[in-house]
Image: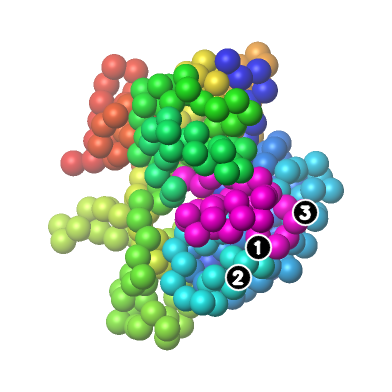
Amino acid sequence: MTADMQIALGPLLYYWTRERVFSFYDEIAQSPVDIVYLGEGVCARRHELRLPDWLEIAATLRAAGKQTVLSSQALIEAESDLNNLRRLVAEDGHLVEANDFGAVRLLSEAKRPFVAGPYLNVFNPPTLAKIASIGATRWVAPIEMSGAVLSDLQASRPAGMQTEVFAFGRLPLAFSARCFTARHFNLQKDACAFKCESYPDGLELRTRDGKPFLNLNGTQTQSILTYDLIREVDKMREMGVDVLRISPQAEHTAEVIAAFASRIAPPPDSHASAALPAGAHPAGWCNGFWHGKAGLARIEATREEAVQ
């Protein structure tokens, strides 16, 4: 059982203005979050912030007592992306989250400890042992992993390896070389006019009959529903999960962090789930993957609901 469960704020997945990003992390510095992931992991064309800007934000957060982690890009497509990755790896003073195996290789060769991100598809004990042997000190379980599978993996977790679980936010389901936000506006990816900036929580995709289906975030496809595991905190604590990840969103992030902090603080507040603000789930919530169901399923006590 984990005695001191921590809260992490995952990397910002959306494209916001520079001013908005700095203001957001100024607010986060005052929140009860323990770990903050920083950096552009979705699209290299997003240029409002560069590595020196993220390092400046990291310095502010560290001064406020937070641990900071630099997140690498999930989809490396060009030599310029690889150069950005090399610069990230060269930042000796910062732990790096590796979101593809190219980053794992570079960090391992540099003998740098790292966080194994959720896109590495670590699903079995040999893979977990392998990444631990080459430098991973924490791993983030893949978003589609069920609680039952995670429990089995925890039983054989390498010594010294922390486990982090994506516990709140729209699920990052897939990446593509194609930019779907640009395509929505009949634009080419390399001439996208940075349309993502107009959608601070992504662009809602509906079916032909008008029902919410997915969320478009440039080259990333997300769930339209908000994944929410606040009801599963006690179970995760029993499993020995060390860190709960909250994914940033345009509104209510600080309030969500506060609700999770209340839920994990001793003594645990079993009513904290009711403290989430109404706008925390803009299109509804789900937790199906955790229960071994379809991702959009919603399990409440003994009742299962899903988007029809």
Q: Which residues are magenta?
A: 89-118
Name the kind of residue labelled 3 in the image: Gly
Reading the image, the residue beneath label 2 is: 84
Q: Nearer the viewer, residue 38 or 141?
A: 141
Look at the numbered disc 1 and give the secondary structure of its residue. helix
Is residue 308 something one can see in this rendering?
A: yes
On screen, residue 125 versus residue 59, left or right, reads left
What kind of residue is marked 1? Answer: Leu
Q: Which image quarter holds the N terminus?
A: top right
The residue at the point 25 percent across, 59 percent down is 206
Q: Is residue 137 above or below residue 275?
A: below
Q: How far is disc 1 from disc 3 in space, using C-alphas?
A: 10 Å
Q: Which residue is mark 3?
A: 93
Tag 1–tag 2 contact (CB < 8 Å): yes
| Residue located beneath label 1 in the image | 88
User: What residue do we see at 66% from left, 67% from top?
Assistant: 87
Neighbours of disc 2 within 10 Å: few (<14), some (14-19), many (20+):
some
